[in-house]
Image (cartoon, rainbow, N blue to C red):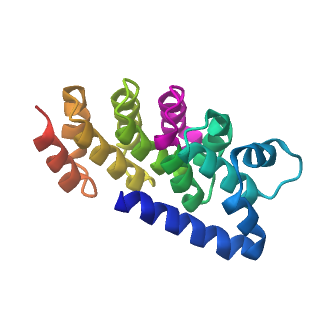
Amino acid sequence: METVDEELRAFTERIRAEAGAACEPLLAAGPQELVGVLTALEQPLWAREVAAFRLGCAGDRRAFESLVLLLNHRDPARCVSAAHALARLGDPRTARAAAALATNPLRTAYAISAVRLLAQLRAPESAPALIATLTRLLSPNDPYWRVAVACVEALGDLADPAARPALTTAQSHPRLAVAATAALRKLP
């Protein structure tokens, strides 16, 4: 529960810093007003994010599309908030969407939240998507080593034996070796 409270506090502070007092009515709005923000034209990004985050955390699936767009945003803080809400949303489409984002080579720079979300979801799509992403990132001098580390850690958390070959290969990469060894120890 403490993590949830911390995530909500960080989200609220970030939105207040971005939008000032203009965000206060939305932070207190009910579901119908929040849905109206998601569907209205010319809403600022912060307003759409507040609406999607609050609806997603409440389990309202009308926020799904907006949250997936935010999961794929360039701003890491927006991605983290979207992943947090998607994890609580309970929508069966979430794992497929996170897997699609994590495995998209054109979006690798923004994939770390999708990778971590896949580990949280523990869905059938999780391990195959993480293995595919990690395998792609194992090429020498790949600039997205932080995403690769997140994949390694997520695969360790999932403890899927199918990850053994990719994790074994990851051990030979200096930036991944420690995490890969720890992940391999978690496999059955």
Residue 107 seen anywhere in this rendered image of the structure: yes
**In the image, is residue 97 above or below residue 86?**
above
| The residue positioned farthest toward the right in the image shown | 41
Residue at the spot 54% in from the left edge and 37% down from the top edge: 101
Q: Where is residue 69 in the image (x, y as percent from the top left)?
A: 66, 43
Residue at position x 52%, y 38% in the image: 89
**What kind of secondary structure does the magenta stretch mostly adopt?**
helix
Q: Does the magenta stretch include residue 106?
A: yes
Magenta run includes residue 13: no
Range covered by the magenta-colored residues: 86-107
Q: At which x and y percent is residue 154?
A: 31, 43
Q: Which of 74 and 18 is in front in this view?
A: 18
The residue lying toward the viewer, choosing from 105 and 16, is 16
Q: Is residue 111 visible?
A: no
Query: What is the quadrant of residue 97 in the picture?
Result: top right
Where 91 sits versus 119, above or below?
A: above
Location of the N terminus (image quadrant): bottom left
Which quadrant, please, contains the C terminus? top left
Q: Where is residue 59 in the image (x, y as percent from the top left)?
A: 55, 39
Q: Is residue 96 left or right of residue 168?
A: right
Q: Is residue 25 left or right of residue 140?
A: right
Between 32 and 163, the one lying in front of the other is: 32
Above or below — where is 77 with respect to 17?
above
The residue positioned 33% from the left and 51% from the top of the image is 149
